[in-house]
Image (cartoon, rainbow, N blue to C red):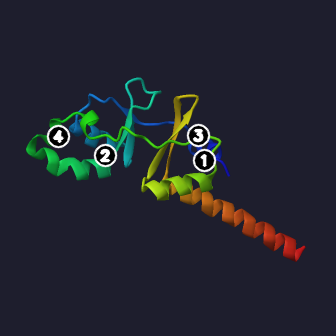
Amino acid sequence: MQVQSILNAKGDQVTTISPTATVRELAALLKANKIGAVVVSRSGRSIDGIVSERDVVHKLTDFGPKFLAVHVSEIMTSDVLTCSPDDTVDDCMEMMTGRRVRHLPVEKAGKLVGLVSIGDIVKAKIDEIRVEAESLKQYIAG
C-alpha cells in the first residue's frame, strides 16, 4: 500500500503555521484542531519545518516564563523527514521508527501535499493485513 492511498482516504488537508507565529498561537492551533503536530510554512505549500507537542514540551525549560511569546521558528525541527505519495507504508514505518518521529509531511515535486501520522500508518498496515488474511481464508475455503 502506498501513502497516496492513505491521503485518498483521509484527505490532503494539512494544518500549517507561520514561522513567525508564537508558541501561544501554536498551542491554540494544536488544541483547536486536536492534532499533535503542524507543518511550519511561510506559503502553506512549502515545508520550512515541523513542530509537535513533543517540541513544545522539550523546549519549555529552555525558554522559561517567556516561552509562550517565542516564535515557532525557534522551536521547530528544520531538518524535516518527508515522504512521497509513492512511498509504501512499510517505507514510512521504517523511516518513522528509525528516526523516532510521529508525523511525516508528504511532499511531491517540492510541494506539501499531505501529512501522515504514525496512527495513519498503523491503521493502513492493519487494513493491509486484514485484506491478506481474508484472501487467504477465501483461498483455503476455495
Q: Dot 4: within a 10 Å radius of its alpha carbon, few (fewer than 14), some, or many (20 or more) residues?
A: some
Label ID, residue 50: none
Q: CA distance from mark 1 to mark 4?
A: 34 Å
Q: Nearer the viewer, mark 2 or mark 3?
A: 3
Which residue is disc 2 drawn over?
31
Q: Position of residue 36 (x, y in %)?
A: 37, 49
Question: What is the CA distance from the residue labelled 2 to the residue labelled 3?
Answer: 27 Å
Reading the image, the residue beneath label 4 is: 68
Three-letter code for the amino acid on which mark 3 is drawn: Ser
Tell which of 6 and 3 is nearer to you. Answer: 3
Q: Which residue is mark 3?
A: 84
Quadrant containing the C terminus is: bottom right
Q: Earlier in the sequence, mark 2 or mark 1?
A: 1
Mark 3 or 4: in front is 3
Q: Residue furthest top?
A: 43
Q: Indicate which label's residue lies in the foreground, 1 or 3.
A: 3
Quadrant of residue 21 within the rendered picture? top left
Mark toward the start of the polypeptide (3 vs 4): 4
Q: CA distance from mark 1 to mark 3?
A: 12 Å
Number of marks present in the image shown = 4
- Res. 6 mark: 1
- The x and y percentages for residue 119 are 50, 56
Determine the CA span between mark 2 and mark 1: 24 Å
* x and y, in percent, of residue 1 in the image: 68, 52
Measured as percent of width and height from the top left, residue 5 is found at 65, 46
Sooner in the amino-acid sequence: mark 1 or mark 3: 1
Q: Secondary structure at mark 2?
A: helix
Q: Work out whether residue 94 or residue 122 is closer to the camera in this orientation and state it.
A: 94
